[in-house]
Image (tube, rainbow, N blue to C red):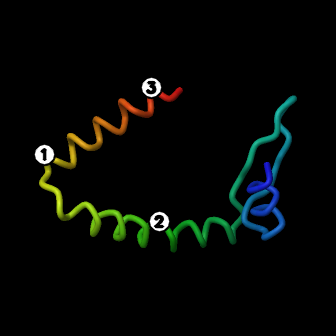
Amino acid sequence: THLVDLLERRGLVERRPEGRAKRLYLTPEGRELFEEVVPAHEDFVAERFSVLSDEEQALLHNLLRKLDRGLR
């Protein structure tokens, strides 16, 4: 919750009650930041993975998914 509190203080997300739970929503400022950051992140990842062939990328993806399932 520390990270969510920080994002909320910065005006990037807001908590809204829905029944017994609270849901998080991006504020307009949060949406704007998201739309700036995601393309930059995608470019960063694509650049890093460009050294791998399509086959190697698929293999890595599958191995990481397998590890993720094993850690849950």
Q: Residue at x 47, y 65 (%)?
A: 38
| Contact flag, marks 3 and 1 (Cβ < 8 Å) | no
x%, y% of residue 9?
84, 66
Closer to the camera: disc 2 or disc 1? Answer: 1
What type is the residue that disc 3 sits on?
A: Gly
x%, y% of residue 54?
14, 51
| Contact flag, marks 2 and 1 (Cβ < 8 Å) | no
> How many marks do you count on the picture?
3
Q: CA distance from mark 3 to mark 2?
A: 28 Å
x%, y% of residue 5?
82, 57
What type is the residue that disc 1 sits on?
A: Glu
Q: Quadrant of residue 20?
A: top right
Q: Which mark is residue 70?
A: 3
Reading the chain from its start, which is encountered first: label 2 or label 1? 2
Label 1: how many Cα within 10 Å (few below 14, some 14–19, many 20+): few
What type is the residue that disc 2 sits on?
A: Val
Closer to the camera: disc 3 or disc 1? Answer: 3
Position of 61 with respect to 59 (left or right) is right
x%, y% of residue 70?
44, 25
Q: Which mark is residue 55?
A: 1
Closer to the camera: disc 3 or disc 2? Answer: 3
Q: CA distance from mark 3 to mark 1?
A: 23 Å
Q: Residue at x 62, y 65 (%)?
A: 31
Position of 26 with respect to 44 (left or right) is right
Residue of label 2: 38
